[in-house]
């Protein structure tokens, strides 16, 4: 599976990141990464379709966890490309991405519009 097979508009990516991110913060506290099960639970609680739930995993799981989850399902998704698109959707796309390590936690990226997350302190 590729990211184009589970395509979302930038507006929908931002909305999904906000809903799932707020849920993760509210239920598990502020963490650099969340477990696959925690992200799955947040997706379910927020009625994120299984067709696009991998976007939440790209944003909030480690690269290793993301790849292991997809390998177990027999799928191949591009973590770096999907994470880049999610970060751009939440306002972190202003600088050159060649300067950043896409394996950084979502909390470590500069230029994210934190106001999008209601529960972020």
Image: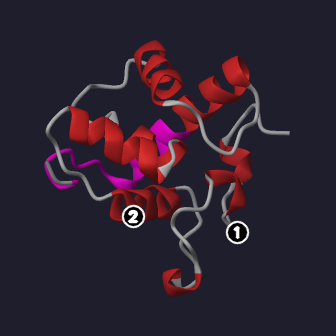
In terms of depth relative to the viewer, which is nearer, 6 or 33?
Answer: 33
What element does badge 1 sit on? Answer: loop
At 66% from the left edge and 60% from the top edge, which residue is drawn?
112
Q: Where is residue 50 drawn, in percent x and y?
A: 25, 26
What element does badge 2 sit on? Answer: helix
Asked if one can make out residue 12 in the rendered structure from this viewpoint, the answer is no
At 61% from the left edge and 42% from the top edge, which residue is drawn?
33
Residue 87 is a magenta residue:
no
Q: Crowdedness of circle 1 by 10 Å Cα count: few (<14), some, many (20+)?
A: some
Picture layout, residue 99 above or below residue 110? below
Residue wearing tag 2:
80
Labels 1, 2: front one: 2
User: Which mark is first along the chain, 2 or 1?
Assistant: 2
In terms of depth relative to the viewer, which is nearer, 11 or 84?
Answer: 84
Residue 4 is a magenta residue:
yes
**Total numbered badges shown on the rendered structure:** 2
Q: Which residues are magenta?
A: 3-17
Picture layout, residue 106 above or below residue 15? below
Query: In the picture, which quadrant includes the C terminus?
Result: top right
Kindly indicate whether the residue at mark 2 contacts the one at mark 1 (C-beta within 8 angstroms).
no
CA distance separating discs 1 and 2: 16 Å
The figure's colour scheme reads: secondary structure
Q: Crowdedness of circle 2 by 10 Å Cα count: few (<14), some, many (20+)?
A: some
Picture layout, residue 106 above or below residue 99? above
Residue wearing tag 1:
110
Instruction: Judge from the rendering whether residue 119 lies leftward or rightward of residue 99; answer left or right.
Output: right
Q: Where is residue 75 drawn, in percent x and y?
A: 16, 43
At 68% from the left edge and 39% from the top edge, which residue is drawn?
117
At 59% from the left edge and 66% from the top edge, which residue is drawn?
92
Asked if one can make out residue 121 in the rendered structure from this viewpoint, the answer is yes
Q: Where is residue 79 drawn, in percent x and y?
A: 36, 56
């Amino acid at each position: 599976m590729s990211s184009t097979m589970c395509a979302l508009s930038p507006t929908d990516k931002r909305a999904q990141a906000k809903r799932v991110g707020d849920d993760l913060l509210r239920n598990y506290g502020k963490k650099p990464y969340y477990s696959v099960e925690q992200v799955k639970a947040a997706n379910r609680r927020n009625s994120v379709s299984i067709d696009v739930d991998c976007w939440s995993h790209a944003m909030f799981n480690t690269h290793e966890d993301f790849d292991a989850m997809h390998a177990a399902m027999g799928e191949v998704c591009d973590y770096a490309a999907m994470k880049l698109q999610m970060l751009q959707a939440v306002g972190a796309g202003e600088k050159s991405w060649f300067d950043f390590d896409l394996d950084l936690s979502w909390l470590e990226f500069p230029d994210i519009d934190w106001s999008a997350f209601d529960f972020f302190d």
